[in-house]
Image (cartoon, helix red, strand yellow):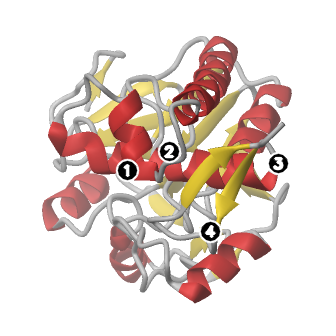
Amino acid sequence: MSGGHEYPPPYGAAEVLEPGIRRILAPNPSPMTHLGTNTYIIGQGQVAVIDPGPADKDHLKAILAALAAGERVSHILVTHAHLDHSPLARVLSDSTGAPVLAFGDARAGRSPLMEELARQGNLDGGEGVDSGFSADIALADGQEVSGPDWQLRALHTPGHFGNHMSFQWGDTVFCGDHVMGWASSLVSPPDGDMGAYMMSLDRLATTGVKRLHSGHGAPIEDAQARIAELIAHRRAREEAIRAALGDGPADASTLAARIYTDTPPGLMRAAARNVLAHLIDLAERKRIVAHGNLSTTTVFSLLEG
């Protein structure tokens, strides 16, 4: 077991970040997962595992190997039902007998609007969703989960995903994909919701958090500064979208091409999904107009007058 805060650690190695927190990096790097998914082991003796990660037998072995003699997993906590975070939860539960705890299944936590848009099926989306995910115990917002030497408070932080939860331990928050230091989060409707994402950022800021441990990437040591930076980034993106609409009505893909001029072609679809999320939010707030039912090809325009 290695120690220190260097990132990235070797795949499969358990690093002690601080007393009571171990991190294991899963071997699933990609443009959307950075260098891989961070799995966290909380406490000693009876431990909690946050985000077991993808369905990877070697990562399962690494989690189990990280346990000291006599330790056992008592809780398995999942931030959200994406394929890089949740599939190993059930396998780990079968191996250890520990229950899986989350806000709910992959459809839980959607706003009424997003639930209706999902029902209509006109928004595509569904990137990386672990549609078969289920929890043994559904956590309520604000519910506390504890072991002999640790206590976590579950915070419902929808936005990146409807069932997204963060877990607070003192002034530290395990924030899944809601806040990352290396990139902004994908918000892809109807699973993603930009209005909810912004509210969840505001909520995290009010918790007094000082340090964030993300689902991907190194620890964020100045949590408040990073949250403020992401809020400013999203507000600037809103204004860029409105400015681009000044050149004429357009759909999300057209606007993404106007705005993301330096983005590699392989990331343009994700850019368009983020733009669509902003457009839906702006239309809901009556700052722009959607022409027709909401879909991937809906044309939006500035308000007249």
**From this viewpoint, which residue is outermost toward the front?**
305
Q: Find residue 114 and report its horizontal and vertical position in percent.
A: 67, 71
Query: Label 1, on which residue?
Result: 253
Task: Tell me which numbered mark, 2 or 1, is placed earlier along the sequence.
Answer: 1
Circle 1 or circle 4, nearest the eye: 1
Q: How far is the residue under mark 1 from the one under mark 4?
A: 34 Å
Quadrant of the image containing the C terminus: top right
Q: Classify mark 2: helix, strand or loop.
A: helix
- Mark 1 or mark 4: whose residue is earlier in sequence: 4
Answer left or right for 297 relative to 34: right
Expressed as whole percent of the image width and height from the top left, the position of residue 165 reads 65, 55
Which residue position is annotated with label 2? 275
Q: Are marks 3 and 2 in contact (CB under 8 Å)?
A: no
On the image, numbered disc 3 is attached to which residue? 285
Residue 172 higher or lower than 37, as above or below: above
The image shows residue 205 at horizontal and vertical percentages of 78, 26
User: Cα distance, mark 2 to mark 1?
Assistant: 8 Å
Q: Secondary structure at mark 1?
A: helix
Residue at 32% of width from left, 30% of height from top?
A: 15
Of the residues under marks 3 and 1, which one precedes in the sequence?
1
Cα separation, mark 4 vs mark 3, equals 30 Å
**Number of numbered tags placed on the structure image:** 4
Using the rendered image of the protein, determine whether residue 45 is visible from the camera's viewpoint.
Answer: no
Label 4: which secondary element: strand
Residue hosting label 4? 102
The foreground one among 184 and 57 is 184
